[in-house]
Amino acid sequence: MDKMQVPRSHSFLIMIAAIFLILLLNKGVLGCDDPGTPTDGVRDPPESGDPVPLPPKTVIHFSCDEGYLLDGPPKIICTKENKWLPEDRPSCIGKQGLSLRHGGSVLER
């Protein structure tokens, strides 16, 4: 018996559905793009390594390694509009980089 063949109309529909799904994933329509992890910092949950958008209501918490301070929000949330709130991404700054000399005195942030 010959191999079963999928009718051309079905093959076309499967191809269109696959293209549509790829476009949705690439545009972040199905969630928020992964925000990454700050240099000299960590996040919870950790990065999965998958290029799949994170679903709405995902909350990511950030912190910094010892000797660094968080500059920016300690957590962000993926909204149903597929945007992170707040929009700012945190970074980790070395404590020595936050000292400002002002009139001979050192001010710590």
Image: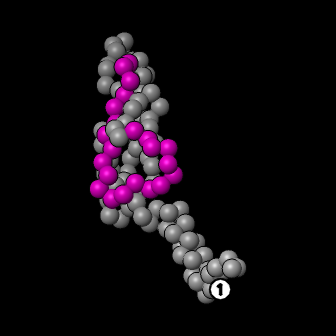
Q: Tag count in the figure?
A: 1
Name the residue at 50% across, 48% down.
50
Query: In the figure, 78 relative to 35: above or below?
Result: below
**The residue positioned farthest toward the right in the image shown:** 2
- Front residue of 61/74: it is 61
Using the rendered image of the protein, determine whether residue 73 is visible from the camera's viewpoint: no
Query: In the figure, 62 relative to 104: above or below?
Result: below
- Front residue of 12/96: it is 12
**Where does the magenta region start and end?**
46-67
Name the residue at 45% across, 27% down.
40
The location of residue 57, given as percent across then percent down, is: 29, 56
Query: In the figure, 90 relative to 24: above or below?
Result: above
The location of residue 107, given as percent across then percent down, is: 32, 19
- Front residue of 94/12: it is 12
* Residue 56 quadrant: bottom left
- For label 1, the crowd category at 10 Å Cα-Cα, with few meaning under 14, some 14 to 19 and many 20 or more, is few
* Residue 3 quadrant: bottom right
**The residue positioned farthest toward the front in the image shown:** 1
Which residue position is annotated with label 1?
Answer: 8
Residue 85 on the magenta segment: no
Name the residue at 35% across, 65% down.
81
- The amino acid type of the residue labelled 1 equals Arg
